[in-house]
Image (cartoon, rainbow, N blue to C red):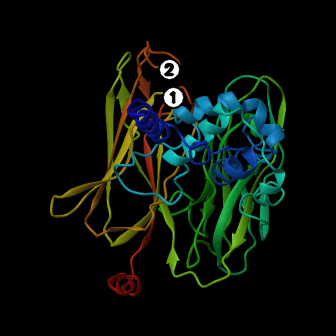
Amino acid sequence: MKRSFTLILFAAAFLSVFFVFQPISSAKVAKEVTFSKDVAPIFNAKCAECHRPGEVAPFSSLSYKDVRPWAKSIKEKVLDKTMPPWHADPNHGSFKNDRSLSKAEIETIISWVDGGAKEGNPKDLPPVPKFYEGWTIGKPDQIFSIPEQTLVEKGVEKYRYVQIDTNFKEDRWIQAAEIRSTGRSAVHHVIVFINAPGTTGTEDGSLLAGVAPGEQTAIFPAGYGKKIPAGAKLTFQLHYTPNGKDTKDISSVGLIFAKDAVKNEIKTRPVMNPRFVIPAGADNHEVKSAYTFKEDIRVTSFMPHMHLRGKDFQIKAVFADGNSKILLNVPKYDFAWQSYYIPTDPIVIPKGTRIECVAHYDNSSKNKFNPDPTKEVRWGDQTWEEMMIGWVSYYYETPQTKSVAAK
């Protein structure tokens, strides 16, 4: 009897340990990640801008059928963080147009692919983002188009400049502007400048909008906008790259007019240095530029611009008291993605502050994109030449904006 009682106690102890350390299936089963419920919301928020029919991306992210064949490639690009493209150092500033994925979003996408990239219940799909006939900004209030341009299949295209009359009888405030081109395969970039009566279109603040690979559309919040004066013209700067076939292009700029009173006029100026020489073979050549603001301003966006040898780009503010602050740091510049960066809140820049830009270039054979590491490089329009521009958008601070900030 004593022996059997001991065995019972042993068995009870063993079973208690067994059940304590065994997983409880109902609590421990990993959540099944599906496209419809978990992945589609991420793609809609961070990818659909480019990954939709008619855009530059190789597939649409709006449906499971289109996404499924790309599952393994998606995992690879998400893991190495090349997609979605975002190059700002998170240690310096926060940006409202940050399209990078959070750690949780990355884990969700990886789990989805590793779990077989399942569709799930189509009823769980979120609403598909709405885009108006290819325009990101919605239906434009007015569209200005250049005459059709004919491009040859090969050779070097110099910049073209085409001027269009607006015929505006009164000043118009622009809430959003977007450029579209029918010959996109041969378009490197398009910039539209405002030529107010009596100006050349090169003055501070004359830039209206631009488009280049990866560049996002200019959309301003209520109360902000760009002004096109009565009688102004629009000048299109067109940079075409022959693509091996005869191409036609009609580039247009679509405008949405401000519905509310604009209190802050957005201006855009380049902080640039066109006088540099990058030695042949140099793998970390530094070029600087600077501009000192003579009025109080608030910065609303930054955009670094270099060409194929661009390596990194930093923009900082050096204040009158000698203190400085890094406003934007792009440690790995990518010419294929001309991103611009919108601070979460406009950055206060007191008058007398110097905006400094510091860029580095890799003109060595280590740079796989380098057209020719045996030649020194200077400023030039073409992609095998170089540029050094830190575009800064801002508005002048008024007594009214100061009082609002004080509250």
Q: Secondary structure at mark 1?
A: loop
**Label 1: how many residues lie within 10 Å, few (<14), some (14-19) or many (20+)?**
many
Query: Looking at the image, how many numbered discs can be counted on the residues?
Result: 2
Q: Nearer the viewer, residue 273 or 89?
A: 89
| Pointers 2 and 1 in contact (C-beta within 8 Å) | yes
Residue appearing at x 37%, y 37% in the figure: 275
- Circle 2 residue: 370
Q: Nearer the viewer, residue 241 or 341?
A: 341
Residue 100 shows up from this direction: no
Q: Position of residue 310 (x, y in %)?
A: 44, 32
Residue appearing at x 50%, y 15% in the figure: 372
Residue appearing at x 57%, y 72% in the figure: 221
Residue appearing at x 36%, y 81% in the figure: 405
Residue 255 shows up from this direction: yes
Locate residue 244 relative to residue 318 in the image: left or right: right
Q: Amino acid at mark 2?
A: Asn
Q: Would you identify the image quadrant in which residue 286 lies? A: top left
> Would you place residue 373 above or below residue 64 in this image?
above
- Circle 1 residue: 308
Mark nearer the N terminus (2 vs 1):
1
Which quarter of the rendered picture does the N terminus lie within? Answer: top left
Q: Position of residue 81 (x, y in %)?
A: 52, 36
**Residue furthest left in the image:** 321
> Would you place residue 347 above or below residue 56 in this image?
below
Q: Position of residue 72 (x, y in %)?
A: 67, 28
Which quarter of the rendered picture does the C terminus lie within? Answer: bottom left
Q: Position of residue 101 (x, y in %)?
A: 54, 47
Q: Amino acid at mark 1?
A: Leu
**Label 2: how many residues lie within 10 Å, few (<14), some (14-19) or many (20+)?**
some
Q: Nearer the viewer, residue 175 or 232?
A: 175
Residue 294 shows which numbered tag?
Answer: none
Q: Nearer the viewer, residue 370 or 19?
A: 19
